[in-house]
Amino acid sequence: MANPILLVENLVKRYGSVEAVRGVSFSVEEGEVFGLLGPNGAGKTSTVEILEGLRDLDSGRVSVCGLDPQRDSQKLKHEIGAALQSTSLPDKLRVMEALRLFSSFYKRRRSPEELLKRFGLEEKRNAFYSQLSGGQKQRLALAMALVNEPKVLFFDEPTAGLDPQVRREIYDIIEELKHEKKTIVMTTHYIEEAERLCDRVAIVDHGKVVALGTPRDLKSRAGGATRIEVRLSKPEPEGALKNLEGVADARQVDGTYVIHSNRPPQTIVAIVKHLEAEGNELVSLEIASPSLEDVFIEMTGRRLRD
Amino acid sequence: MKNFATLTRMRIQLTLRNKMFVFFSLVMPFAFFFLYAGIFAKGQPQVVRFFLGPVLSLTVMGSFWGLSAALVMFREQGILRRFHVTPVTASDMLASSVVANYVLIFPTILLLFFLSRSIFHVVHFGNLFSSFILISIGAISFSSMGLVVASVTNTMQETQVINQLIWLPLIFLSGATFPLAFLPHVAQQFSLFLPATYLVQGLQRAIFDSVPIWQLGVEVASLAVWAVLTFFLSAQLFRWEPEVKVPRKAKLFVLATAIPFLLLGLWENKYGNIPVLAQSAYDSLSKPANPGTSPVRPK
């Protein structure tokens, strides 16, 4: 770790008696895209909002661009850009007005005209916010995060609620920012997003980091094995499946048996044979190449879905 | 300072794009004005002049409705959160509401003056400087009160209910709708505890009796103190996030803003002459007491 631009140590955040963040630690390098991956309610948004200076922390230490978000929040706000979750703009504000207004708040500024062009909003420059589609609103949110040439960008669930095609549009934008060596901290509950965009990922669950590393690292840690998911007509002891050929790991998750195999063809044949012998039947079978989902299942015994 | 200015411009722009605003700030006051001037005053210039103060006060006091409710909506929709990640401060946000409000009442005010002159032939508007000062301080203090309501309510509905509860006594017991002289003695005593009364009576005296500003010291000072108090309180209670609920205790703080007028009301009830002045102004219009049922002779 050469010189982290962002540092989180043993961060704890409580809401009343609920501990939303329970001792999270990580650091982010300059020019890195760092992802917090986890299900809803894992504490990702709380963590990010503390880093943005929007919320106070209960214990631990955080530093962003060498500043304490709690004490130097005013200074910090000049250095960061953010696309928040569940935020909006006044209905009757026009796109160009929004960019101009928000850039007027900063000392360091980028031309709103250029951002408009870059985010494909030129045609919508005079449209009211309420007239924009979901994807256009999100593009505007990302453009607005850049008005002050921020040193660190925070994207909180940048593609939540968008349809797949629009989501890919947003990925392209974030990838472009990545090529420009922007430092980005993003949260997501989409595996694909984390794998495709992030240099490093912290997998978060119940307010704790359960795994941290590059997507490739994390996947190889999960054994790098192919995932075979089967549904059966009758329950089967996990142990019996674990002993089949090529199987690295087998467990039951929400009524499905998730089997990790190093030699998928052999394992599938073995499963079928085994079931036949037991008088059990295969209801469905799916094969997936290893992903961060496998890491999540391994660490938590649950699936990463809302 | 600069953020405050750009925010003010945005608030004015957004409000002008809101059709409801046009209705409440243009259509409503004129309906009231024509009701007063046409029916009560039967179009007689001196009586219209008598009612101009109260009608202007309605516009000035009405300023606590609009932008405070807009601020609650901004919070509910997560719009304030977006401003929270920028260097904009709570005071920027609140002060821009007050100033935008102030600017936005002037078209209505000027039109009311214009109509009085062109349609009802009112030639003398009393002391315009006094009116200007009272309108300014009144608009600032009432919109600050609106900000306090915005700060202590959690939803738009709650805001509307509380606004109604405040609004009704303010307009009916201050002389803004019925002349103060027209109210029973108990109501007159009660009215001296309401900030609205000082605005309405002050404005009426400025316009009808041409009272210079230095004779309106009590009115100006009390409204100014109240404006500072309510603005300060609203800044303390300001919340950016929709899910942060206001603590119960905060609602008690709000009662604290009533203290200056509680004290002033006690003092005025004992030593003051506001109802007497209101009575003599009213009597000067005509001998019979009801302006609606009897012909009125101008002086």
Image (cartoon, coloured by chain):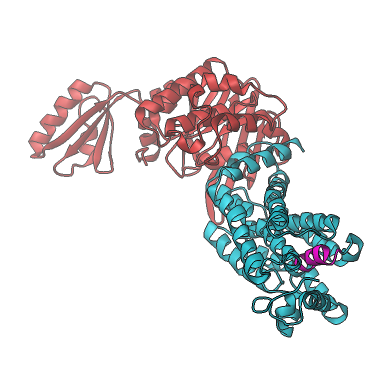
Name the one closer to the observer, A130 or B123. Answer: B123
Q: Is residue B200 magenta?
A: yes
Name the one closer to the observer, A90 or B299. Answer: B299
Residue B157, placed above or below residue A84:
below
Residue A306, placed above or below residue A182:
below
Residue B4 left/right relative to A47: right
What residue is drawn where x is 35% and y is 41%?
A302
What residue is drawn where x is 70% and y is 38%?
A73
Write the start and end of the magenta stretch as one range. B199-210
Rendered image quadrant of residue B299: bottom right
The C terminus of chain A sits in image quarter: top left
Chain B image colour? cyan
Chain A image colour? red
What residue is drawn where x is 65% and y is 29%?
A103
Rendered image quadrant of residue B253: bottom right
How far across and how far down the image is residue A224, in percent? 35, 23
